[in-house]
Image (tube, rainbow, N blue to C red):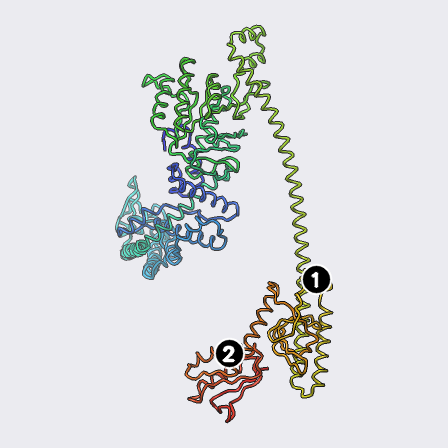
Amino acid sequence: MNERAQKILEFDKVKRILSRYAVSDVAKGRLLELKPAADEQLIKSMQRETSEGVTILRSGINIPLNELPDIRTSLKRATMGAVLTTGELLSIASVMKTSRLVKNTWSEKGIAECRIIGSIIEEIHIFSSLEDKIHKAIISENEIADGASPRLSAIRKEKRILFQRAKEKLELYISSPQYQKFLQEPIITIRNSRYVIPVKQEFRSSIPGVIHDQSASGATLYLEPMPVLQINNELRRLEIEEQKEMEQILREFSEKIAENREYLEVTFEGLVRLDFILAKAKYSMDIKGVEPGLNSRGYINIRKGRHPLLRGEVVPIDIYLGDEFTVLVITGPNTGGKTVSLKTVGLFALMAQAGLHLPAEEGTELSVFNEVFADIGDEQSIEQSLSTFSSHMKNIKDIVDKADSRSLVLLDELGAGTDPTEGAALAMAILDYFCEKGTRVVATTHYSELKAFAYSMERMENASVEFDVETLSPTYRLTIGIPGKSNAFEIAKRLGLKREIIELARSFLNRENIQLEDLLKGLEQERERAKREKEEIQELKKQYMMRLKELEDEKEKLRNREEKILAKAREKARSIIEKVNKEAEKILERLKEVEAQDTRQVRDRIIEEVRRRLKKASDDYSPKEPLIKKAGAKVVAGPINPGDKVRVESLNQEGYIVSVDEREKTAQVQIGIMKVNLPLSSLVKIQEEEDKADSGNVKYSSLAMEKTREISREIDLRGLTLDEALLKVDKYLDDASLAGLPSVVIIHGKGTGILRKGIQDMLKTRKDIKSFRPGNMNEGGLGVTVVEFR
């Protein structure tokens, strides 16, 4: 991306502000080196990571990145075999601590939607054991703890004992009246790592010992008395051993760091990237930024955009181009905000392509450009003897040579600095060239000729910055579609210039200029009227949306009420079904009693009793007015035969004929899982129908009829393994039970008895089996098992 344009548009200032939000020096450096990308997918990814950072900050999650020193050099040194210092080890341990805290925080409070940040934290490693050892062993950058190793602890313990002995002996000298007159001061001090006392020069021979130093004046000698000499020698030896032990401790830690270098580098890189992302997110929140939409068709639509470097009350601008027109010409008075508008567009493009949010409203959209070019400001060069116009032309020449349809070009005061007529003509030619090439251009100018030119070209549009004539000050509002007025006469009039001079000046204008000014005035009036109408429409829209919300709320209340009614109905239906099921169980019990009765009279009496109970249950639990009325089945004339579908009028149920007893004038009817003997007079033959609502019963009854006709009363399992036999007999028993067989015979053979025992164990677990026994002599003996169903 063009470095000169980045400097002109002050992108470096944005980066400096952005870097202040980072914790680590590495992240700060990367933010300062941030460059706009040109790959749309990469930019979208960078924008998403910034948005995820904002989501985390707004949720109140505090990612603990407080300690993040740069450990990269230390990791390289450790890998090369160097012994790291205590300070380096503490820095590495602080990074380990940060990684642990970050992982723990995310595991407790992480947001699943933040996939980019989640994947970064997933790659971070924890080094709890090594971190703990370093913190326990190293107290500060200059001190290793006694407990860093048993050897170090023993050495320091011995040192403390020897020091105490040396102190006691030296205190004999400084506290004894005999020696006090020899001493400069009654103190114990250290010279050359040895404990000494300050002796006056004239008494140097009064105390036997070794002199290690003297004062600057030579009046004081630092003497090591002979009784302390051996102790100091031993202390010196221990200090050397202590130093070696500390170096060994640091070497062992350094080796551990080298072993974990790869994981530490990945972890450090992940933490720096988190710091980088969260810095962008913090900046976004401070500027009230939004993630812009991105496209590759050259379309720009900035809504309520605010230049991020302006302070105080900033007037936002709405600006768009790249769809109906590709060149926007902004006119208006000086200090009216033309250049700020120009810079806002360019800076927004750079920020968006660097993954930064923009200080604008939702709906802001920018195109991804390969290059952004800018020619802004007075760049007159004394050294190169270039005038303002020459300097601008040199820059514009470079832009013309390099710009294409994927470029954004920003031109401030195009054509200025030379003869107005020639400058305007040259400016029109440049704009026409860029228009033909498809380059997106925003240009500012004072030339009236460019207003008319932009008005006459299809792919160009005028825009203006407003000026309040009453207050003689700019409003900084940008209006697209209307060129700016010079306001020179209006300003002169407000300032009190004589009327006759102003009128004379008007007469000097050519007719075209007067018509243009009148046209601009009319357009301004139309714009104000349109603005008022827009405000009225917005108010109506607001009222409509409020009413729509009220209707939606009412609709939601009705939906909730409907749900409650349906829930209550379902509960009532469930209760009815439970009662009917209980009644049906009682009826089944009575029907089984019927089968056990020998006399027809008792049987008929019980059947009538069952009929009455079913009728009562039907009357009690059937709704008087069904919620959904269903057309009745069509009655079919003719005799009733096995397999026909019938309706039992007394029971208000449908079923299938299993068998017919013409002599008794009765029929056995399959109703669901029940078989009932009923008089033929109580049955009505009906037409078979495809009814989705009753498809379950139809399928079940049809299946039962089919099983009744096809099922055998015995099954032969000989030759099968136990597992095969169990699977086969389990299915057979289900079919036999469904068919209503009272008993069946399982042939398993005698053999070793394994098959017989396995099958009989399985029969014990089935609730539909009433009893089972070995076969009689005429049934097959121990080679078969006779099963009776309930």
If the image is split into quadrants, where does the C terminus sit?
A: bottom right
Residue under label 2: 732
Which residue is pictured at 70% across the width and 80% down the height?
607
Which residue is pictured at 61% across the width and 30% down the height?
534
Viewer-closest of 151 and 252: 252
Q: Is residue 664 above or below residue 517?
A: below
Query: Would residue 227 be visible to someone looking at this image?
Result: no
Viewer-closest of 762 and 394: 762
Query: Would residue 245 be visible to someone looking at this image?
Result: yes
**Labels 1 and 2: the sequence-earlier one:** 1
Task: Say if mark 1 contacts mark 2, CB within 8 Å.
Answer: no
Viewer-closest of 545 and 645: 645
> Where residue 349 appears, x then y in whole percent?
43, 33
Circle 1 sits in a helix, a strand or a loop, which is it? Answer: loop
What is the crowding at mark 2: few (fewer than 14 residues within 10 Å), some, or many (at least 20)? some
Cα separation, mark 1 vs mark 2, equals 40 Å
Viewer-closest of 57 and 182: 57
On the rendered structure, is 310 left or right of 159? right
Give the residue type that dot 2 points to.
Answer: Tyr
Residue under label 1: 626
